Image (cartoon, grey):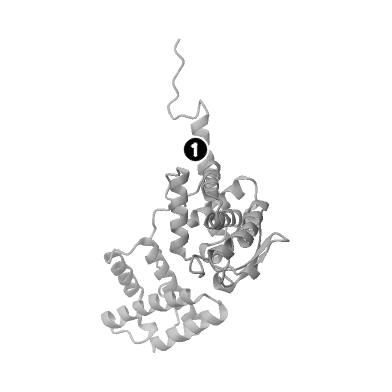
Amino acid sequence: MNEQLLKEYVYYLKVTKNLAKNTLSSYRSDISSYLDFMAKNYRVVKLDQITKTYALNYLAKMKRDDLAVKSIQRKLSAIKSFHRYALSEGIVATNVIDTVRQPKGQKSLPVVMNRTETEALIEAAKGDGKALALRNLALVELAYGSGLRVSELLSLKTADLHLNTGVVHVLGKGGKERIVPLGEPAVAAIRRYLVDARPLIHPAAKEGVFVNKNGTRLSRVGFYKIIRKLAEQAGIEKPISPHTLRHSFATDMLENGADLRAVQELLGHEDVLTTEIYTHISKSRLREAYEAAHPRAAKTVKEPTP
């Protein structure tokens, strides 16, 4: 019975939430593991047989299995959502798991580049000015200049680029569309790449904007290797990845006075709370700059010698 309920719930998510296939698969897997645990350990055949104690024991099992805190949080969120659905459908009378607390993990701020590092990365991307260098420069300029997710950037089609009006049409998570403006450096780099470089990389390349030597779309691994190599050439010691460009875009926007809601829309975040982490990065960078530059910022200020 629970398996049928799970099937109906996943269909409900697909129809009402328009979630991506990978997200639906994760929900199905997380909840299925939860139901298997209940069946094997407590002989649960109906959802209303699950108690809060059973749920807490499942949470304890995940911790014993040394799952990462983020993984536990994701799984528990999926399970809670499943129970809320069952309650709304009248399948259970109470939501026994609603008060089970999420485990707390140490919050780590995303890695971002400062302005000097960003400029150094862009300079390194210029390379020898040949076809692959023009592609890499367009990649970096677009990623930093728009804040697109890696998946969004690599799935772009040439028809998504509207260079005359300086915007790009993006298909984001859950099939949600948005229009993101582009700056002149990004527009110029992309236009030069499409005209002078892409046909040389592979003359028969299909509609994907960024392609490899085989004429197929550049992969996430390929993009990662490009950024790591450029970061090394630029002398950047931080662990830079393609997603760092998105983080740096958001942080620089906020540091230069952009409205939080505007940045949320540009990034394609469903919840503004997700965007707020960049305000913490911005404050952290301001603190670092203050402590590095102001003579009275040190924790221990030396008194003048009489």
- The residue depicted at 39 percent of the width and 77 percent of the height is 29
Residue matched to label 1? 288
Q: From where the camera sits, is residue 262 visible?
A: no
Q: Is residue 136 visible?
A: yes
Identity of the residue drawn at 43% across and 77% down: 25
- From the viewer's perspective, is residue 72 above or below residue 26? above
Looking at the figure, which quarter contains the N terminus?
bottom left
Residue at 47% x, 77% y: name it: 24
Instruction: From the top left corner, tell me how far across and down residue 107 is, in percent.
Output: 43, 53
Residue 219's spot in the image, x, y percent?
A: 47, 66
Residue type at mark 1 is: Glu
Q: Residues within 10 Å of mark 1 (few under 14, many from 20)?
A: few
Q: Nearer the viewer, residue 197 or 102?
A: 197
- In the drawing, does residue 39 fall left or right of residue 245? left
Q: Quadrant of residue 58?
A: bottom left
Disc count in the image?
1
Foreground of the two, 38 or 68: 68
Between 225 and 213, the one nearer to me in the picture: 213
Q: The C terminus appears in which quarter of the rendering?
A: top left
102 is higher (above) or lower (below) than 133: below
Q: Secondary structure at mark 1?
A: helix
Instruction: Measuring from the top left, give residue 193's x and y in whole percent.
Output: 60, 59
Instruction: Check the image and name the residue furthest to the right.
Output: 165
Q: Is residue 174 left or right of residue 219?
A: right
Residue 177 position, x and y percent, is 63, 70
Residue furthest to the top in view is 306
